[in-house]
Image (cartoon, helix red, strand yellow):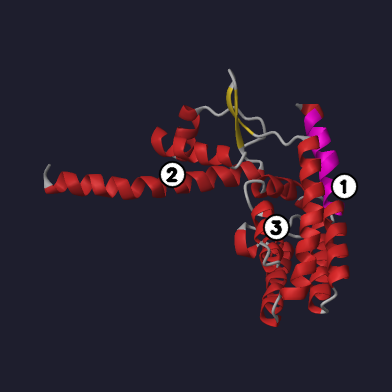
């Protein structure tokens, strides 16, 4: 093997994971935002053309999305973008209410003053984003700039963190993206987030848990009819 061929193979070995990761991120974002609609049949040739990649990186991205349950493989029918089921998401939100309520309680007990100040700064950035969107949406990117992720991490409870921010996290983000587009939801959700932070700062564990539970149940009351309407349409 020539040096140039070896370099080419090495370059491709480094490029392929990067390309697959970029493709994965792009498709994931499009599924969560609804650009790639629920129930859409996965046709590799179409997606490869749409995202400008070859079949190899695309298949790797699809496998990762299947593990996250954003794409589901149906026997004898191929793969499709997940369709959010009312019963499944109702169960998730019930568990989420309990887990995030406990996370808020623990955050009130364990968060440092520096972490609380950073949380307030995060909500200030969210407020700016809402104003720039004319109040029409409250969309939080995943990870450390997601308010709910930050609270779960502050609980210092690995079991809570793994369950809230594990494989079901992206399904929850799909629902939150839909509820975030509901008129008046954005400023209300932001105000509720600020109340939760105030309770955490006051070290009022019981109130922090109560406010978080109300926040989650209120979000489900918005999401449920949206999912029911989509189910009728399908």
Residue denoted by label 2:
20
Q: Quadrant of residue 104?
A: bottom right
User: At 85% across and 58% down in the image, what residue appears?
Assistant: 213
Left or right of residue 138: residue 72 = left
Magenta segment includes 230: yes
Q: Position of residue 151 (x, y in %)?
A: 71, 65
Gap between marks 3 and 1, in whole Å? 23 Å
Task: Write the start and end of the magenta stretch as one range.
Answer: 218-231
In this view, the residue farthest toward the bottom is 113
> Measured from the top left, where is residue 210 in percent x and y?
88, 63
Per the image, is 118 magenta?
A: no
Whether residue 131 is situated above or below residue 24 in the rendered picture? below
* Farthest residue, direction left: 2
Residue 99 vs 6, above or below: the answer is below
For label 3, the residue is 160
Q: Dot 1 surroundings within 10 Å: few (below 14), some, or many (20 or more)?
A: few
């Amino acid at each position: 093997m020539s040096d140039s061929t070896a370099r080419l193979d090495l370059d491709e070995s480094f490029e392929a994971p990067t390309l697959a990761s970029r493709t994965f991120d792009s498709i994931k974002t499009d599924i969560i935002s609804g650009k790639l609609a629920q129930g859409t049949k996965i046709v590799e040739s179409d997606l490869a053309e749409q995202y400008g990649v070859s079949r190899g990186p695309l298949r790797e991205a699809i496998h990762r999305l299947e593990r996250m349950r954003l794409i589901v493989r149906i026997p004898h029918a191929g793969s499709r973008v997940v369709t959010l089921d009312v019963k499944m998401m109702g169960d998730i939100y019930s568990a989420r209410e309990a887990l995030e309520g406990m996370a808020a309680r623990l955050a009130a007990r364990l968060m440092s003053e520096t972490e609380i100040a950073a949380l307030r700064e995060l909500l200030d950035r969210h407020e700016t984003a809402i104003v720039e969107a004319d109040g029409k949406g409250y969309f939080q990117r995943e990870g450390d700039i997601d308010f709910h992720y930050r609270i779960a991490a502050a609980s210092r409870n690995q079991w809570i963190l793994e369950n809230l921010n594990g494989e079901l996290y992206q399904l929850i983000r799909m629902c939150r993206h839909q509820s975030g587009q509901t008129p008046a939801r954005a400023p209300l959700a932001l105000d509720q987030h600020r109340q939760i932070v105030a309770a955490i700062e006051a070290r009022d564990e019981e109130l922090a848990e109560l406010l978080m539970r109300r926040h989650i149940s209120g979000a489900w009351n918005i999401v449920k009819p949206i999912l029911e309407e989509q189910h009728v349409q399908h």
